[in-house]
Protein backbone atom coordinates (compact mmCIF):
# COMPACT_ATOMS: atom_id res chain seq x y z
CA UNK A 1 0.00 0.00 0.00
CA UNK A 2 1.47 3.40 -0.96
CA UNK A 3 2.44 5.76 1.84
CA UNK A 4 0.05 8.69 2.39
CA UNK A 5 1.99 11.86 3.07
CA UNK A 6 0.77 14.28 5.72
CA UNK A 7 3.89 16.43 5.44
CA UNK A 8 6.54 16.75 2.74
CA UNK A 9 10.24 16.76 3.45
CA UNK A 10 12.18 18.67 0.81
CA UNK A 11 15.65 19.89 0.05
CA UNK A 12 16.82 22.64 -2.35
CA UNK A 13 17.39 21.78 -5.99
CA UNK A 14 20.03 24.31 -7.07
CA UNK A 15 21.44 25.26 -10.45
CA UNK A 16 23.44 28.10 -11.91
CA UNK A 17 24.25 29.06 -15.48
CA UNK A 18 26.31 31.90 -16.94
CA UNK A 19 26.06 33.23 -20.49
CA UNK A 20 28.97 35.00 -22.13
CA UNK A 21 29.47 37.30 -25.10
CA UNK A 22 32.94 37.20 -26.62
CA UNK A 23 33.99 35.19 -23.54
CA UNK A 24 32.84 37.96 -21.20
CA UNK A 25 30.11 36.98 -18.65
CA UNK A 26 27.02 39.14 -19.20
CA UNK A 27 24.22 37.18 -17.49
CA UNK A 28 24.08 34.67 -14.63
CA UNK A 29 20.96 32.79 -13.55
CA UNK A 30 20.77 31.06 -10.18
CA UNK A 31 17.97 28.72 -9.12
CA UNK A 32 16.92 27.21 -5.81
CA UNK A 33 13.70 25.18 -5.98
CA UNK A 34 12.35 22.40 -3.75
CA UNK A 35 12.72 18.73 -4.50
CA UNK A 36 11.05 16.08 -2.30
CA UNK A 37 13.40 14.01 -0.18
CA UNK A 38 11.02 11.02 -0.47
CA UNK A 39 11.70 9.06 -3.60
CA UNK A 40 8.81 6.69 -4.28
CA UNK A 41 5.46 8.30 -3.37
CA UNK A 42 3.29 9.30 -6.31
CA UNK A 43 2.75 12.83 -5.00
CA UNK A 44 6.46 13.33 -4.40
CA UNK A 45 7.29 12.22 -7.94
CA UNK A 46 4.78 14.64 -9.46
CA UNK A 47 6.01 17.53 -7.35
CA UNK A 48 9.63 16.73 -8.21
CA UNK A 49 8.89 16.75 -11.95
CA UNK A 50 6.93 19.99 -11.65
CA UNK A 51 9.81 21.95 -10.13
CA UNK A 52 12.36 20.36 -12.43
CA UNK A 53 10.26 21.69 -15.30
CA UNK A 54 10.02 25.12 -13.67
CA UNK A 55 13.80 25.21 -13.35
CA UNK A 56 14.29 24.41 -17.04
CA UNK A 57 11.60 26.93 -18.04
CA UNK A 58 13.33 29.69 -16.08
CA UNK A 59 16.65 29.00 -17.79
CA UNK A 60 14.93 29.11 -21.20
CA UNK A 61 13.28 32.40 -20.26
CA UNK A 62 16.64 33.88 -19.27
CA UNK A 63 18.27 32.76 -22.51
CA UNK A 64 15.43 33.88 -24.77
CA UNK A 65 14.48 37.22 -23.16
CA UNK A 66 17.16 38.41 -20.73
CA UNK A 67 20.29 37.40 -22.64
CA UNK A 68 19.57 39.55 -25.76
CA UNK A 69 19.01 42.58 -23.53
CA UNK A 70 22.21 41.88 -21.60
CA UNK A 71 24.17 41.46 -24.84
CA UNK A 72 22.79 44.74 -26.21
CA UNK A 73 23.85 46.61 -23.08
CA UNK A 74 27.26 44.94 -23.18
CA UNK A 75 27.84 46.09 -26.76
CA UNK A 76 26.58 49.59 -25.99
CA UNK A 77 28.97 49.83 -23.03
CA UNK A 78 31.83 48.53 -25.18
CA UNK A 79 31.14 51.13 -27.86
CA UNK A 80 31.06 54.00 -25.35
CA UNK A 81 34.00 52.73 -23.25
CA UNK A 82 31.67 52.47 -20.24
CA UNK A 83 32.02 49.80 -17.50
CA UNK A 84 30.86 46.44 -18.82
CA UNK A 85 27.55 45.33 -17.28
CA UNK A 86 26.91 41.94 -15.70
CA UNK A 87 23.32 40.95 -14.97
CA UNK A 88 21.87 38.37 -12.60
CA UNK A 89 18.49 36.64 -12.43
CA UNK A 90 17.41 34.57 -9.43
CA UNK A 91 14.60 32.10 -8.74
CA UNK A 92 13.99 31.02 -5.14
CA UNK A 93 11.22 29.54 -2.99
CA UNK A 94 9.73 29.66 0.48
CA UNK A 95 7.57 26.95 2.05
CA UNK A 96 4.70 28.60 3.98
CA UNK A 97 2.59 25.61 5.13
CA UNK A 98 3.35 21.90 5.54
CA UNK A 99 0.69 20.13 7.61
CA UNK A 100 -2.54 18.13 7.37
CA UNK A 101 -1.66 16.63 4.01
CA UNK A 102 -1.23 20.05 2.38
CA UNK A 103 2.03 21.60 1.23
CA UNK A 104 2.06 25.26 0.25
CA UNK A 105 4.79 27.60 -0.92
CA UNK A 106 5.64 30.40 -3.26
CA UNK A 107 8.43 30.74 -5.78
CA UNK A 108 9.80 34.15 -6.64
CA UNK A 109 12.12 35.41 -9.36
CA UNK A 110 14.21 38.57 -9.26
CA UNK A 111 15.62 40.31 -12.31
CA UNK A 112 16.45 43.75 -13.58
CA UNK A 113 13.63 45.14 -15.70
CA UNK A 114 13.98 47.07 -18.97
CA UNK A 115 13.80 50.35 -17.03
CA UNK A 116 16.69 49.34 -14.80
CA UNK A 117 14.56 48.66 -11.74
CA UNK A 118 14.30 45.31 -9.95
CA UNK A 119 11.33 43.19 -11.01
CA UNK A 120 9.92 40.54 -8.65
CA UNK A 121 7.58 37.86 -9.98
CA UNK A 122 5.83 35.52 -7.55
CA UNK A 123 3.91 32.28 -8.06
CA UNK A 124 1.92 30.43 -5.38
CA UNK A 125 1.45 26.65 -5.23
CA UNK A 126 -0.63 24.54 -2.84
CA UNK A 127 -0.46 20.76 -3.18
CA UNK A 128 -2.69 17.96 -1.95
CA UNK A 129 -0.16 15.35 -0.81
CA UNK A 130 -2.72 12.55 -1.07
CA UNK A 131 -3.29 12.97 -4.79
CA UNK A 132 -0.20 14.91 -5.79
CA UNK A 133 -2.32 17.56 -7.53
CA UNK A 134 -2.60 21.31 -6.88
CA UNK A 135 -5.55 22.50 -4.78
CA UNK A 136 -7.56 25.43 -6.23
CA UNK A 137 -8.38 28.50 -4.20
CA UNK A 138 -12.12 27.77 -4.30
CA UNK A 139 -11.53 24.52 -2.37
CA UNK A 140 -10.88 26.52 0.79
CA UNK A 141 -14.35 28.08 0.85
CA UNK A 142 -17.86 26.61 1.11
CA UNK A 143 -19.64 26.16 -2.19
CA UNK A 144 -21.46 29.23 -3.49
CA UNK A 145 -19.97 31.34 -0.71
CA UNK A 146 -18.95 34.26 -2.90
CA UNK A 147 -15.30 33.76 -2.00
CA UNK A 148 -13.94 36.17 -4.63
CA UNK A 149 -16.14 39.00 -3.34
CA UNK A 150 -15.01 38.27 0.22
CA UNK A 151 -11.34 38.30 -0.70
CA UNK A 152 -11.62 41.56 -2.62
CA UNK A 153 -13.49 43.16 0.27
CA UNK A 154 -10.80 42.01 2.70
CA UNK A 155 -8.05 43.43 0.48
CA UNK A 156 -9.85 46.75 0.09
CA UNK A 157 -10.34 47.04 3.86
CA UNK A 158 -6.67 46.30 4.47
CA UNK A 159 -5.54 48.88 1.90
CA UNK A 160 -7.74 51.53 3.52
CA UNK A 161 -6.37 50.61 6.95
CA UNK A 162 -2.78 50.94 5.74
CA UNK A 163 -3.59 54.23 4.02
CA UNK A 164 -5.13 55.64 7.18
CA UNK A 165 -2.09 54.59 9.19
CA UNK A 166 0.26 56.13 6.62
CA UNK A 167 2.01 52.78 6.36
CA UNK A 168 1.97 52.43 2.56
CA UNK A 169 1.44 54.24 -0.72
CA UNK A 170 -0.94 52.96 -3.36
CA UNK A 171 -1.59 53.80 -7.00
CA UNK A 172 -4.49 56.15 -7.69
CA UNK A 173 -6.36 53.46 -9.63
CA UNK A 174 -5.89 50.69 -7.06
CA UNK A 175 -9.66 50.12 -6.64
CA UNK A 176 -10.09 49.26 -10.32
CA UNK A 177 -6.89 47.22 -10.49
CA UNK A 178 -7.82 45.30 -7.34
CA UNK A 179 -10.58 43.60 -9.30
CA UNK A 180 -9.03 43.63 -12.75
CA UNK A 181 -5.70 42.08 -11.72
CA UNK A 182 -7.08 39.50 -9.28
CA UNK A 183 -5.83 36.01 -10.17
CA UNK A 184 -7.20 32.99 -8.23
CA UNK A 185 -3.92 31.16 -8.85
CA UNK A 186 -1.97 33.75 -6.86
CA UNK A 187 -2.34 32.36 -3.35
CA UNK A 188 -0.68 30.16 -0.75
CA UNK A 189 -1.43 28.96 2.77
CA UNK A 190 0.20 30.14 5.98
CA UNK A 191 -0.29 29.18 9.61
CA UNK A 192 -2.28 32.37 10.19
CA UNK A 193 -4.51 32.36 7.14
CA UNK A 194 -4.83 32.20 3.38
CA UNK A 195 -2.53 34.69 1.66
CA UNK A 196 -3.29 36.05 -1.81
CA UNK A 197 -1.17 38.50 -3.72
CA UNK A 198 -0.93 40.79 -6.73
CA UNK A 199 1.84 41.40 -9.26
CA UNK A 200 4.44 44.00 -8.48
CA UNK A 201 3.33 47.48 -9.67
CA UNK A 202 -0.32 46.36 -10.04
CA UNK A 203 -1.55 48.23 -6.95
CA UNK A 204 1.39 50.18 -5.60
CA UNK A 205 4.81 51.63 -6.49
CA UNK A 206 7.94 49.51 -6.63
CA UNK A 207 8.79 50.30 -3.01
CA UNK A 208 5.80 48.21 -1.90
CA UNK A 209 7.15 45.07 -3.56
CA UNK A 210 4.47 42.42 -4.06
CA UNK A 211 1.19 43.32 -2.28
CA UNK A 212 0.05 40.42 -0.07
CA UNK A 213 -3.21 40.12 1.88
CA UNK A 214 -3.83 37.43 4.49
CA UNK A 215 -7.36 36.35 5.46
CA UNK A 216 -7.60 34.41 8.78
CA UNK A 217 -9.19 30.96 8.98
CA UNK A 218 -12.19 32.13 10.96
CA UNK A 219 -15.80 33.26 10.68
CA UNK A 220 -16.73 33.71 7.02
CA UNK A 221 -13.12 33.42 5.91
CA UNK A 222 -11.37 30.43 4.33
CA UNK A 223 -11.75 26.93 5.74
CA UNK A 224 -8.89 25.96 8.02
CA UNK A 225 -6.47 23.41 6.47
CA UNK A 226 -7.19 19.95 7.81
CA UNK A 227 -10.95 20.51 7.65
CA UNK A 228 -12.60 18.85 4.68
CA UNK A 229 -12.14 21.17 1.71
CA UNK A 230 -14.62 19.24 -0.39
CA UNK A 231 -13.75 17.64 -3.66
CA UNK A 232 -10.18 18.23 -4.77
CA UNK A 233 -10.54 17.61 -8.47
CA UNK A 234 -7.31 17.12 -10.41
CA UNK A 235 -6.77 19.65 -13.18
CA UNK A 236 -7.94 18.68 -16.65
Image (cartoon, helix red, strand yellow):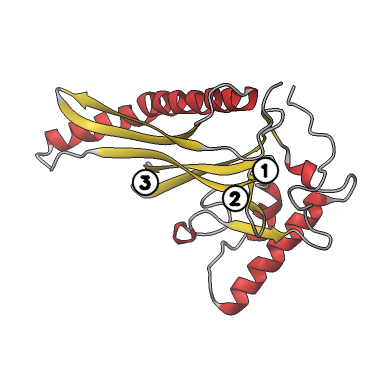
Describe the element under mark 2 as helix, strand or loop.
loop
In x, y percent, where is residue 178?
67, 54
User: In which quadrant is the N terminus drawn?
Assistant: top right
Residue 174 position (above or below residue 117):
below
Q: Quadrant of residue 11?
A: top left
The residue drawn where x is 27% and y is 39% is 87
Which residue lies most toward the left here? 81
Which residue lies most toward the front here? 1
The residue drawn where x is 74% and y is 56% is 152
Residue position for label 2: 198
Q: Quadrant of residue 173?
A: bottom right
Describe the element under mark 1 as helix, strand or loop.
loop
Disc 2: CA contacts within 10 A as few (<14), some (14-19) or many (>=20): many
Of pointers 2 and 1, the one earlier in the residue sequence: 1
Question: Distance between the Cα atoms at labels 2 and 1?
Answer: 8 Å
In x, y percent, where is residue 225?
73, 49
Image position of 67 (left or right of 2): left
Question: Distance between the Cα atoms at labels 3 and 2?
Answer: 20 Å
State yes or no: discs 2 and 1 in contact (Cβ < 8 Å).
yes
Q: Which mark is residue 115?
A: 3
Image position of 68 (left or right of 42): left
The residue drawn where x is 50% and y is 23% is 53
In x, y percent, where is residue 183?
67, 43
The residue drawn where x is 22% and y is 38% is 86
Residue position for label 1: 183
State yes or no: discs 1 and 3 in contact (Cβ < 8 Å).
no
- Of the pair 49 and 3, the residue shown nearer to us: 3
Q: Mark 1 or mark 3: which is in front?
A: 1
Q: Mark 3 or mark 2: which is in front?
A: 2
Question: Distance between the Cα atoms at labels 1 and 3?
Answer: 25 Å
Describe the element under mark 3 as helix, strand or loop.
loop
Image position of 231 (left or right of 45): right
Amino acid sequence: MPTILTQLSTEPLTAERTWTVEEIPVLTASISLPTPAEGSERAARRIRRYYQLQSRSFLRYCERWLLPAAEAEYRAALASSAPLPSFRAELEYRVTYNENGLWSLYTQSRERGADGRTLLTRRGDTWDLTSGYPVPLAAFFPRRSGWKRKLLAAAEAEIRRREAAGAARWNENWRRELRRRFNPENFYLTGDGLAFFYPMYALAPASAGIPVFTVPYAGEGPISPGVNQGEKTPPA
